[in-house]
Amino acid sequence: MQINQKNTFFKNQMESQLKKNNVRNFFCLLLMMLTLASCKSSKNVVSTEVSSSPDAVKTEKRIVELINQNRQTTRMMTSKMNLQLVSGSKKMSVGGNLRMKRDDVIQITLSALGLFDLGCMELTPDYLLVVDRMDHQYIKVEYKEVDFLKKAGIDFYVFQSLFWDELFLFGSKGSAPSAKNFDLRRESNGVKLTNEDSKWMALTFLADVIQNMVSQTTITGRQANTKDISLDWQYQTYGKLGEKKFPTQMQININTGKKPIQATISLSNLKTNDGWETRTEINKKKYSQVSLDTVLDRIMKLAK
């Protein structure tokens, strides 16, 4: 009986502490990470001109082919996850799970101490859903409703390629691009691939020529009002999923021109399980829907 009372007291204290804006702030930062592509691109890469010899060009083209060959063929993945977000003096870290089904869904569920369900984020080709279980709120929007994403051509397939560590192009629906889609340049630590077909965002990839994987993806704004907006997604360690490599630690640097945000995703226990629900159901009697503008207002306050 005493143990039950202690557990109840502990749970109540934890819930009270978590409700002190931490959950709301955490989801705002997480939404910012996934929807406001923003962070200064890495400046520690030293460029050197590509040799104009046909053999050198063939080598760089071959690297693009090898990276595409290393794309995952597994359609399902599940893993344990630790997610840390840092924005100025705010530091938040939670556990959870990452589940993905190729061309169908990306699910991020968050929990505190492995005991309390904080909420989830779900991305599908049709919509973005964020559920805050502590405050019983949710937001559900189509990508075309977010003006920035619509103009830049950022959709589900862009996020999928970022999580799966792949080369991609805006609006390509996840298909693998070829070397002809990029300006290729040798770097001291790999090959730099640049695509500026979009007038809104520039794409830059740094290819690891040892592992034949993308080691860094950078999305940078090209318009006058978005030049300070960029996202830098780095792949730091790899594990095995099925028969191929999969990133197990990713660092995401975000910048809106104001307060930078850093997110670190660490994955473990990678599996190809398929026995899970690919869609999150919302009890609309218990949860209230909040507008995108409301969430964006919260985000901008955090970014100041």
Image: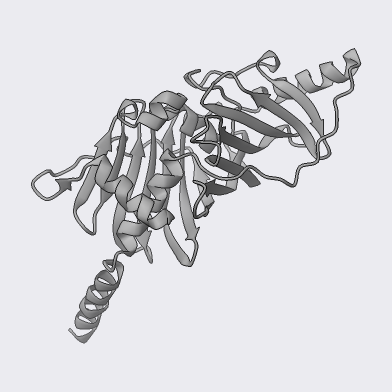
Q: Is residue 274 left or right of residue 86?
A: left
Residue 195 in view in this figure: yes
Which quadrant is home to the C terminus? bottom left
Which quadrant is home to the N terminus? bottom left
Q: Is residue 25 left or right of residue 263?
A: left
Residue visible at 41% across and 46% down? 32
Of 148 and 267, the residue lying toward us: 148
Residue 255: x and y in percent read 53, 47
Residue 154: x and y in percent read 45, 28
Determine the residue located farthest toward the left in the rendered image: 285
User: Is the residue 218 above or below the residue 304 in the image?
Assistant: above
Residue visible at 49% across and 39% down? 37
Of 254 and 127, the residue lying toward us: 254
Determine the residue located farthest toward the front in the rendered image: 224
Residue visible at 59% across and 42% down? 232
Colouring style: one colour
Of 152 and 12, the residue lying toward us: 152
- Quarter of the figure with residue 275: top left
- Quarter of the figure with residue 96: bottom left
Q: Is residue 56 left or right of residue 238?
A: right
Residue 67: x and y in percent read 68, 27
Residue 79: x and y in percent read 47, 47
